[in-house]
Amino acid sequence: MAEANDSLGLVGTTIDDKYVVESVVGEGGFGVVYRATHKLWRKPVAIKCFKTLMDAAPAMREQLLKDFIQEGALLTELSGRTASIVQARDVGTLTTSNGAWVPYMVLEWLEGQTLDEWLEKNGQQPLTFELALSVLEPIAVALDVAHVRNIAHRDIKPANIFIVGTMGSEHMLVKLLDFGIAKVVQSAAEQGFTKTQGQLTAFTPSYGAPEQFSRAHGATGPWTDVYALALIFVELLAGKYALEGEDFIQLGMASADPNRRPTPRTLGVDVSDDIEEVMRRALAIKPTERFQRAGEFWDSLRIAAGLGPMRLGTGAERPVVTGMPASRASALPMRASAVPASREAFAATAINETGPPPMQTAPPSHGTFKPTVTGDPSPKRFPVGLVAGLGVLLVAGAVGTVVVLGKKGDDPKKDDGKSAAATPTASVTTSASAVPKKPSCPSGMASIAGGQFFMGSDDPKADDDEKPAHNVTLSPYCIDLKEVTVADYKACSDGGKCKRAKNEVDYPDMTVEEKKVYSPLCNINDPKARAEHPINCVSWDMASLYCKAQEKRLPTESEWEFAARGPDGRVYPWGDVEPDGRHLNACGKECVDWGKKVGQKLTAMYDGDDGFPNTAPVGSFPMGASRYGLLDVVGNVWEWASDWEGRYTPDASTDPPGPADGKERVIRGGAWNGALPSWVRPSQRYAFPPETYSFAVGFRCAKPLK
């Protein structure tokens, strides 16, 4: 880009006596990107100056700078954990020759091109499933590192995916851009630090989730990134945009159209039932019905394709598709020959610390999957920044009230990927009078409207304590979609709000040998490697205390059962089909083999290997989800309920709290060592003394829906 576009007048100057500014790389709505050279290292760097924050009043700058530095520090730490996020090197502020105060961030210099540029240069031909997976898997890794801390990107698109090296080669490196300053910019706008006040949300309509177009669909979060990532994956498979629309309003309506979900089959791609179902869930209209993290989505997609879960490493290696020979990667069909790397793009990443641990590898690949595309892929690639350069546009329509803020004079068709911030900035609001505020559940919880069901079972094979089936009416409530993880619980105990989890088992009639064998299975013994596994070896009191610290509580026995099976009387959470290694983590070949190694005789519930000899990372079995989306509600670990154990009566009841007292607390759901299908029926009941610390018992929390 010519120096004439140097709107801040920095070319030829030296920033912080270290960075010699050489040229302008790109300019967008958030800032200007410069190429500079570090005086001592003599290495090129990118400097991103955030002109969006230039309007901050002097009195506000100290707090804004503090926030900015904090976000930069988090990016520096996080980008050191994964090679899939562009690295930050420095942050600071400068004063231009015109006296303008400008925060900046120094980033690594990348040589290559964005995925958007590659697609435009190479035409709209579908990619193979393997190549599409290989390109986007590093992005899923990068996102999950953030998602595990509940931090979202909110503008995932091909222009923010940067490819270093030749597309499809073993040397290809893929990085996520523009993960950074949006949080600070939004906070600044909300607090009146800038002239652009209000709810500031930057996203690209072609890859927008329903909640980005209208708040009526819920809040944005990690699940928003899941939606966008799924759209891009479908686009790569189909060779055309997943959402249909020529303008902001049309795209908003397409995003939330219940009659046309942008799944592979909708776009003419022939995929298996399992893959289509995974994509349908990733592209659900309601955020609560989607995968809540990129890692969950990607693991489910890989498993549906006959591959193992991805390995969420923190090193510099590029994730590869399990079961595909390295020699095959470079030979995969592509849209066209790769283009020599020649361009660059940068972004600031500002997300929270520590990503998830490496996941266990599931069974070996059952072969590679090749989708078939029917119909002619459209060669048209319309600009993703559809509404840029329109000044201030106020549109009222079916997707709510939308205010699009753009720079007057910008080219609405230009989105060359040079600047990660070259997309429009949009404020999406809905009138309070038009959309009444409804009760909602916190992120990570399922919203259950309540209702009636028959609790228990009259099946002749059912245990006596499951009988009789009796009618229960429940009020609306929220319940965790997943079991509480080691990372979740440790954060609470490290903060002094919870007791530390035990590192040894202690349960009734335990032998010395069992204590020796099973104590190592207390997941707190390896909190990093098992961070995403369910917490276990916690008593009922410890579980209850944790839930209270989150302003929640343990679910009642009736709430747990209703969330697991719903009102239709199904035998298992997923329906009436007998359980196998696709549905849950119970005892398979892997569990039996582990038992032999430690001298414990264990019995398999099903043939085959589910990939996890003991506990599994939560959410590893999406095919076993209940009708309300609860994961691992059976298998993995039993779960404490709030009730004392007691016999059922045939009487109908409303919100039953269980017996007033007792000796044992109810546990539900079965565990990884489950030997019989009856153990994982939602109606199955068991109980332990509340002071039990078992390797096979964890919990999830609930709360009223208000």
Image (tube, rainbow, N blue to C red):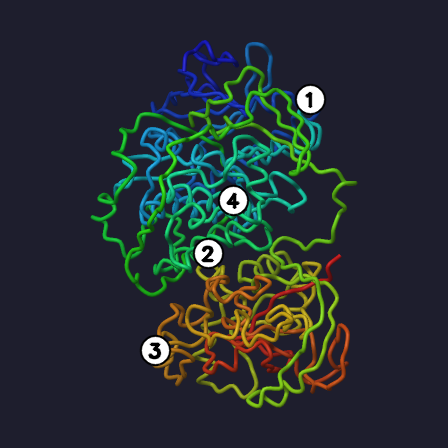
Nearer mark to the viewer, of 3 and 2: 2
Compared to residue 440, the image places residue 74 above or below, namely above
Neighbourhood count class around disc 1 (C-alpha, 10 Å): few under 14, some 14–19, many 20 upward: some
Residue 493 location, quadrant: bottom right
Q: CA distance from mark 3 to mark 2?
A: 30 Å
Amino acid tagged 1: Ala
Indicate which disc, 1 or 4, sits on the residue closer to the N terminus.
1
Q: Are marks 3 and 4 in contact (CB under 8 Å)?
A: no
The secondary structure type at the circle numbered 2 is helix
Please name the residue shown 35% across and 25% down the image.
343
Amino acid tagged 4: Asp
- Front position in the image: 633 or 369: 369
In x, y percent, where is residue 428?
65, 35
- Compared across the picture, whether 481 is left or right of 414 comes to right
Nearer mark to the viewer, of 3 and 4: 4
Residue 606 location, quadrant: bottom left
Q: Which residue is mark 4?
A: 225
Neighbourhood count class around disc 3 (C-alpha, 10 Å): few under 14, some 14–19, many 20 upward: some
Q: Which residue is mark 1?
A: 57
Q: Which residue is mark 2?
A: 278
In x, y percent, where is residue 439?
74, 53
Q: Quadrant of the C terminus?
A: bottom right
Neighbourhood count class around disc 4 (C-alpha, 10 Å): few under 14, some 14–19, many 20 upward: many
Q: Which residue is mark 3?
A: 593
Compared to residue 199, the image places residue 564 above or below, namely below
Q: CA distance from mark 3 to mark 1?
A: 66 Å
